[in-house]
């Protein structure tokens, strides 16, 4: 890895002076982020703070500056480092320009789609087994924006982990059990239609559910629903077979829709799997003396430290049946038994934070030490997402809306040419726009959704990312994509070219950050900056009309960029597919 060989070389010199092993220093040396406004006079920096172990020492800005200067004075330039300077609390290193260009070029060529991943930053990270549960909609109920966020965030984390060599199992835990199925069953007997159930199960079941809910005021309907659910719990064959149809048709349709998002699951699990196992959980809780009965007859687990019930979780209804959390307890134990994983993740919005905290606490009380390796990846709420049909009810509506709005934008763009598959192109760009908007902030932040903002062709959007990728692709097609290793890198002196190199140097650090805190925003903002740099380079580093040697090396810059884009497939870990036809049809000025 290019950045690594430089970091190593800087670390080895520092290690002698500071008397610290180089491995301890490598992570403290970071590539300097590229600034839009000016060319930065350094490629790497060491922050003095990060190598200070003694917490009692003076950390004032003045002191840090002084120590940076003292350290810088002891360091010498060599074949790799040509300039050493200091900044506020940092020692800065500039790499030999020719070496910088050559090394980055070779590395991009050599590592291809593994660029960044092969970095030694990851060498000390143990490869792990992860079970990640995401999406998890409820049958016959709304697929809300929270489910969409869970789907794309879970997919991102799973993809990133796989790329970094971890073993990942993706689980979709459907809301496929509970009293709602009693109502749904009765509703289907009254308003159901087998043809519609087959052709559009999600919509039909939702409609039936809405209809029967209106009728549910009526005592008789309530009783019928109760009976239906009881029969279901008793595994009455006919009742169960209808429920099975609801479930399997719904899954079939989901698989088709998830495909549009590039999302897949290894397992379709669901609450229904755990109705019996949750009874075993209740028994275990009882045996361990953790289950307490309330006056009303419900079962609770005391979660307070002082055992004064100041915090508790209800795990059993008064009729002895299980609750959402009981089924989750059973599911967690089953997952761990089956997969024996190092981490177990749950991706849902933050309104369920309490639920997961309780879940992990109870598991711990039950004596499962692995509860500490369970993690709730929570995310913020989104306001204002609407589709043609109004409030979001179906995932497919959101995907269709993104596509049709993009198609409209494309049609009104001035540069309209024939395009082979406008729908597919609009879909790829529209989904990129949706995902990039979602991934731009901290996952825990709430945000206000806006189709207009997401689909802007200028500014930091998925449309801009797709456009940059398409433009680089077409340049590559125009000038050929034979990558030469013996180009004269000495002619790459323009600040625009150096900025590109400096930015490419940072990629492994960015990947590392996202892999540590599970925040897609680092990679997204990296790619957006890369797009801006590419736009500037495109204007200033002309290939056409330049002397052959210069043209050749400049074209290589295009290919490095394209190569990193190729690695990313626009946003590889978000499963965003590149829209290569974009250029022919739609050319916003980015
Ligand atoms: N089906 C649930 C809902 O829509 C989400 C499930 C989250 N996962 C879990 N293991 N509880 O709210």
Image (tube, grey):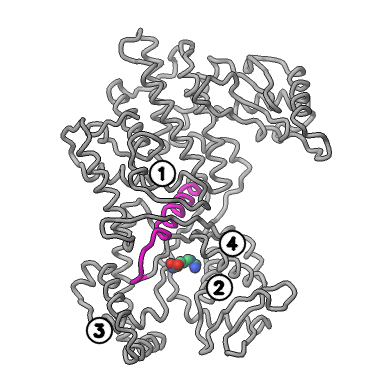
Q: Magenta segment range?
A: 139-162
Residue tagged by mark 3?
189
**Mark 1 closeness class: few <14, some 14–19, many ≥20 residues within 10 Å:** many
Asked if disc 4 and disc 2 are in contact, CB closer than 8 Å, the reply is no
Question: Dot 3 lies on which element?
Answer: helix
In this rendering, is residue 418 above or below 42?
below
Asked if the beta carbon under badge 4 is closer than 8 A to the nearest atom of ligand 1, the reply is no
Res 31 → quadrant: top right
Residue tagged by mark 2?
329
Between residue 114 and residue 59, name the one nearer to us.
59
Q: Nearer the viewer, mark 1 or mark 4?
A: 1
Q: Nearer the viewer, mark 1 or mark 2?
A: 1
Q: What residue lies at 27% left-to-right and 48% top-to-bottom? A: 403
Q: CA distance from mark 2 to mark 3?
A: 33 Å
Q: What residue lies at 46% left-to-right and 19% top-to-bottom? A: 497
Q: What residue lies at 33% left-to-right and 61% top-to-bottom? A: 391
Question: Could you tell me residue 108's position as x and y percent?
Answer: 46, 28
First in residue order: circle 1 vs circle 4: 4
First in residue order: circle 4 vs circle 3: 3
Residue tagged by mark 1?
436
Asked if disc 1 and disc 4 are in contact, CB closer than 8 Å, the reply is no
Query: Is residue 243 within the magenta segment?
Result: no
Q: CA distance from mark 1 to mark 3?
A: 43 Å
């Amino acid at each position: 890895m290019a950045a690594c060989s430089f970091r190593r070389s800087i670390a080895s010199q520092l290690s002698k002076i500071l008397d610290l092993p180089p491995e301890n220093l490598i992570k403290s040396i970071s590539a300097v982020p590229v600034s839009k406004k000016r060319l930065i006079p350094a490629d790497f920096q060491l922050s003095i703070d990060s190598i200070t172990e003694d917490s009692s020492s003076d950390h004032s800005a003045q002191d840090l500056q002084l120590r940076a200067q003292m350290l810088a004075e002891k360091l010498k330039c060599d074949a790799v480092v040509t300039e050493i300077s200091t900044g506020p609390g940092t020692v800065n290193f500039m790499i030999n320009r020719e070496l910088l260009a050559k090394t980055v070029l070779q590395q991009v060529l050599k590592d291809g789609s593994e660029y960044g991943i092969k970095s030694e930053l990851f060498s000390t990270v143990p490869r792990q087994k992860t079970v990640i549960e995401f999406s998890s909609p409820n049958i016959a109920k709304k697929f809300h924006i929270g489910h969409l966020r869970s789907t794309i965030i879970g997919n991102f984390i799973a993809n990133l982990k796989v790329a970094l060599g971890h073993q990942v199992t993706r689980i979709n835990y459907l809301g496929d059990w509970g009293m709602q199925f009693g109502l749904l069953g009765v509703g289907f007997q009254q308003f159901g239609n087998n043809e519609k159930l087959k052709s559009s199960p999600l919509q039909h079941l939702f409609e039936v559910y809405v209809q029967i809910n209106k009728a549910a005021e009526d005592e008789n309907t309530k009783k019928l629903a109760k009976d239906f659910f009881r029969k279901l719990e008793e595994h009455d064959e006919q009742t169960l077979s209808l429920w099975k149809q609801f479930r399997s048709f719904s899954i079939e349709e989901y698989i088709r829709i998830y495909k549009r998002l590039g999302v897949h699951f290894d397992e379709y699990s669901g609450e229904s799997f755990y109705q019996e196992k949750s009874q075993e959980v209740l028994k275990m809780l009882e045996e361990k003396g953790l289950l307490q009965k309330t006056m009303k007859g419900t079962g609770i687990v005391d979660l307070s430290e002082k055992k004064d019930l100041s915090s508790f979780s209800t795990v059993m209804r008064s009729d002895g049946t299980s609750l959402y959390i009981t089924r989750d307890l059973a599911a967690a134990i089953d997952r761990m038994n089956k997969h024996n994983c190092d981490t177990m993740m749950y991706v849902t919005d933050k309104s369920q934070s309490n639920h997961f905290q309780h879940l992990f606490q109870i598991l711990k009380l039950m004596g499962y030490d692995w509860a500490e390796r369970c993690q709730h990846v929570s995310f913020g709420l989104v306001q204002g997402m609407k589709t043609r049909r109004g409030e979001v009810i179906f995932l497919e509506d959101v995907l269709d809306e993104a596509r049709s709005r993009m198609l409209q934008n494309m049609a009104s763009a001035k540069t309209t040419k024939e395009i082979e598959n406008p729908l597919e192109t609009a879909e790829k760009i529209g989904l990129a726009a949706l995902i990039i908007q979602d991934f731009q902030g901290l996952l825990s932040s709430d945000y206000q959704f806006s189709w207009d903002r997401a689909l802007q062709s200028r500014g930091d959007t998925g449309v801009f990312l797709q456009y940059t990728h398409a433009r680089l692709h077409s340049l590559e097609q125009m000038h050929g994509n034979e990558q030469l290793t013996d180009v004269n890198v000495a002619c790459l002196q323009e600040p625009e070219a150096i900025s590109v190199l400096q930015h490419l140097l940072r990629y492994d650090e960015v990947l590392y950050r996202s892999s540590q805190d599970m925040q897609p925003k680092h990679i997204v903002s990296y790619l957006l900056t890369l797009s801006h740099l590419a736009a500037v380079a495109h204007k200033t580093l002309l290939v056409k009309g330049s002397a052959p040697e210069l043209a050749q090396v400049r074209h290589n810059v295009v290919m490095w960029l394209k190569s990193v884009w190729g690695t990313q497939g626009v946003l590889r870990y978000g499963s965003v597919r590149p829209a290569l036809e974009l250029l022919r049809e739609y050319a916003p000025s980015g």
